[in-house]
Image (cartoon, rainbow, N blue to C red):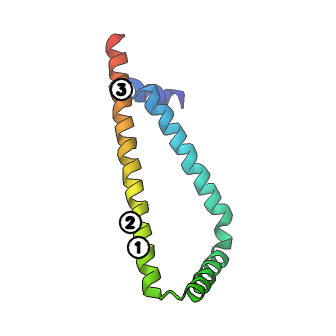
Amino acid sequence: PRRREDMLRNDLGIGNKQLQRARVEVSKIREQRQKTVATLHNAHVEEAMEKARRKIKRFVSRKSKEKEEEQLWIEAEKIAEQKRKAAREKTKLQQQDIAGDQQSQESN
């Protein structure tokens, strides 16, 4: 790993901040994968429970499938916009890291 990091730093000019951020991101993704694998055998049960919850909720609120679907799309659009915003912010931070790394390399 150390040799690989040296290659990234020296050959590609990747800074310490970028490497650290990448390590954190990889760690989060690895944890998410492990959680998914651990709960995968329960997926069919969870799906059935979600379906039952939706039916009960529709019955109690007297909401049609169409109205429920419309509301779900609205919520999905909000979540997608939040993710786009987070991605833009992440890109902005990465660009700041690159600029900071370049400035530190120039000062050395």
Secondary structure beneath disc 1?
Answer: helix
Residue in the picture at 41% in, 73% down: 73
Residue in the picture at 46% in, 26% down: 16
Question: Is residue 84 shown above or below 78?
Answer: above
Secondary structure beneath disc 2?
Answer: helix
Q: Amino acid at mark 3?
A: Gly
Residue in the picture at 64% in, 58% down: 35
**Left or right, 24 with reference to 39:** left
Q: Position of residue 63 (x, y in %)?
A: 50, 86
Residue at the outermost top position: 108
The residue identified by callout 1 is 73
Total marks in image? 3
Pick the front one: 20 or 58: 58
The residue identified by callout 3 is 13
Q: Which mark is residue 77?
A: 2
Comparing labels 2 and 3, the label whose residue is closer to the camera: 2
Q: Amino acid at mark 1?
A: Trp
Pick the front one: 61 or 6: 61
Q: Position of residue 15 (x, y in %)?
A: 41, 26
- Within 10 Å of disc 1 (Cα), the crowding (few <14, some 14-19, many 20+) is few
Residue 12 in sight here: no
Task: Tell me the distance, in whole angstroms, between the alpha carbons under discs 1 and 3.
Answer: 43 Å
Q: Do the residues bearing badges 1 and 2 touch, measured as CB atoms within 8 Å?
A: yes
